[in-house]
Amino acid sequence: MSIRISLLALFIAGIINFNCSQNGNNMEMLADFVADVSNHSYSKPEEVIVTHLDLDIEVDFENKMITGKASYQIDNKSGSIEMYLDIRQMEIEKVTLGEDETETAFAVGPEPDSEYLGRPLKIAIDADTKQVNIYYSTKPEAAALQWLAPEQTEGKVHPFLFTQSQAILARTWVPCQDAPGIRYTYNATVKVPKELMAVMSAGNPTEKNAEGIYKFVMAQPIPSYLMALAVGDIVFKPIGDRTGVYAEPAMIDTAVREFSEMEDMLLSAEKLYGAYRWDRYDVIVLPPSFPFGGMENPRLTFATPTVIAGDRSLVSLIAHELAHSWSGNLVTNATWDDFWLNEGFTVYFERRIMEEIHDKPYTDMLSMAGYQDLQDEIKRQGENSDDTKLKLNLSDRDPDDGMTNIAYEKGSLFVTHIENVVGREKLDAFLKTYFNKFAFKSMTTEKFIEYLEKELIAGDDSLAKRINLASWVYSPGIPEDHPVRESKRFEFVEENLAKWLDGTKSHQLSTQYWSTHEWLHFLRNMPDTITEERLVDLDSTFNFTASGNAEILCIWFQHTIKHNYTASFDSLEHFLMKVGRRKFLEPLYKELVKSEEGKKRAESIYAKARPNYHSVSTNTLDEILGWE
Ligand code: BES
Ligand code: ZN
């Protein structure tokens, strides 16, 4: 106890000290290899940085708790006598130093103003300390974790747990230096109930073992946001030599069929930008409450089952997460202000993979749809909004605020713009070298610009002018010289949409060869002025209300809510009860709360569905529904 009190004093002194030294020489001197993490992390990597984690934990479904020990190897380059980790929604039991585990003092910082940051864990160390061991347990409400009851799974027999660490939720399940610019390797031992299997963003088992103890090695250094764990009744089936799928038994064959192109995707990706550096590439299909479409956890992408449409029409999502193995996981945004470096390049890369797997007309549809997403986003935010710049400023804000279509679609439009200016061959050579040169390093927007100027522009003023870097990166909106997206297949859809709007019946339209993307384009561009009767006409021909395609359902329901097409409402409620993917929930609840009647329905559905949603989704939805 007395150690703790004295450390509290040390802690307060430390905070004052921290504020003074932030702009000091120390920071500038080291700025080259340690990004400034102070935006969203309490860690001070310029003083003490973690290099390796040994995690030894037990997963307790009954108490919704992870308990155990996180042992870090550290590099105390400043000879400091204290170090900092980020923690949130967890209890720290004790901290020890070295292999012989001498107990040491620690202090947890005061309640923060912004809940999302959590608190600093300050640990007393010696100048020559090499290892720090933290004994901890998570709280049931830990934001990264979603504990699912058996009813929330496909099999309905066993519980399930998964993590979602990006952007700064890793600190809710492992004490860590939670900043994307800090990388470390990890080993883990995870104990789970015997009938379940554990998988991580690491080398994975392919079968259950009798003890329920699983060992993992992640030999390449990764940032904390890529630490991931899933536990459940999980089985594995291979697709190719280096690719395969994990899922619940009831889902595995469907998933294998849907993702049969994975091995080809991997080969295409390597052909474009160089060797895959993570050994295997597998995907786990999670229960439907997973809040994202996909998460690029290294070696093991986490994916929503809503990507499975039965016809492989949505698998560009897998190409996207795979592409992150280069853009994001290999060369990583140094701070969340540089998020576009992760997502913009990945969307560009994703579409290059799809062009290899399919063809240009197919990929043009994806790019066109993305361009429409971008226009919608800019309309929503206003074209002068700072949040429409590629380089963001998220200080004093939850990094989740920066996760918009700007990073994805303005980012990829910018890369396409560079391609148009220098030619595909040059851009590809540049990117390949870029991923190699900065492999396992972090990248700031400024460092990227510097590198691009040196390697690609190389003093050519007219080229520099045409690329127009500064305007793309630091100005809001879309620069005038942006690439023009075109899609012949969508033009055909638009002709049919025009006919339909002129009164042609649904069954007379030329839709027989349409893919999901054509349908999405049709539905998305239906004007608000249509009547309920026209929705009935469409539904009787194409049966959207009963579609098994979540992307189609999401757009369709927005129309049916708007026009009070009540025949779809049972299906809508079923969807909202089952699916936890924020991208679908957000527009649907937003549409519902626009009318009095809809608001009542939204509230009653949300009250029932909320326990099925991950904190990432409830954070957004609570606001829409005024639920606090
Ligand atoms: N890394 C993102 C997901 C993410 C971003 C999680 C920011 C937390 C914070 C992932 O790669 C992604 O972009 N997923 C998309 C799908 C993709 C095809 C655009 C999604 O989940 O919708
Ligand atoms: Zn992504």
Image: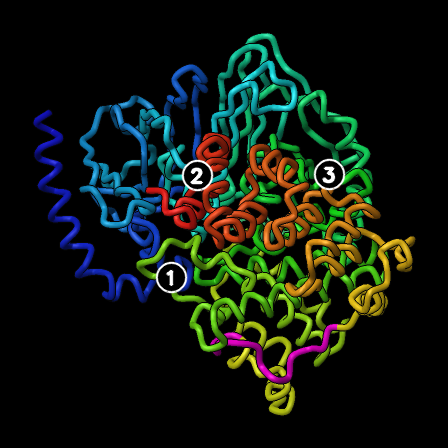
Query: Disc 1 versus disc 2: distance between alpha carbons?
Result: 20 Å
Badge 3, how many Cα within 10 Å: few under 14, some, many 20+?
Answer: many
Q: Quadrant of the C terminus?
A: top left
Query: Disc 1 versus disc 3: distance between alpha carbons?
Result: 34 Å
Horizontal side, residue 498 vs residue 44: left or right:
right
Over which residues does the magenta segment extend? Answer: 473-485
Q: Quadrant of the N terminus?
A: top left
Label 2 beta carbon less than 8 Å to ligand 1:
no
Which residue corresponds to mark 1? 394
The residue that appears at 59% across and 61% down in the rendered structure is 408
Q: Quadrant of residue 345?
A: bottom right
Which residue corresponds to mark 3? 308
Magenta highlight on residue 96: no
Q: Amino acid at mark 3?
A: Ile
Q: Nearer the viewer, residue 164 or 499?
A: 499
Residue 305 image position (x, y, % from top left)? 66, 36
Q: Secondary structure at mark 1?
A: loop
Residue 597 image position (x, y, % from top left)? 49, 46
Q: Amino acid at mark 1?
A: Leu
The residue that appears at 50% across and 61% down in the rendered structure is 443
Which residue corresponds to mark 2? 615
Q: Secondary structure at mark 3?
A: loop
Q: Specify whether residue 52 is in view.
A: no
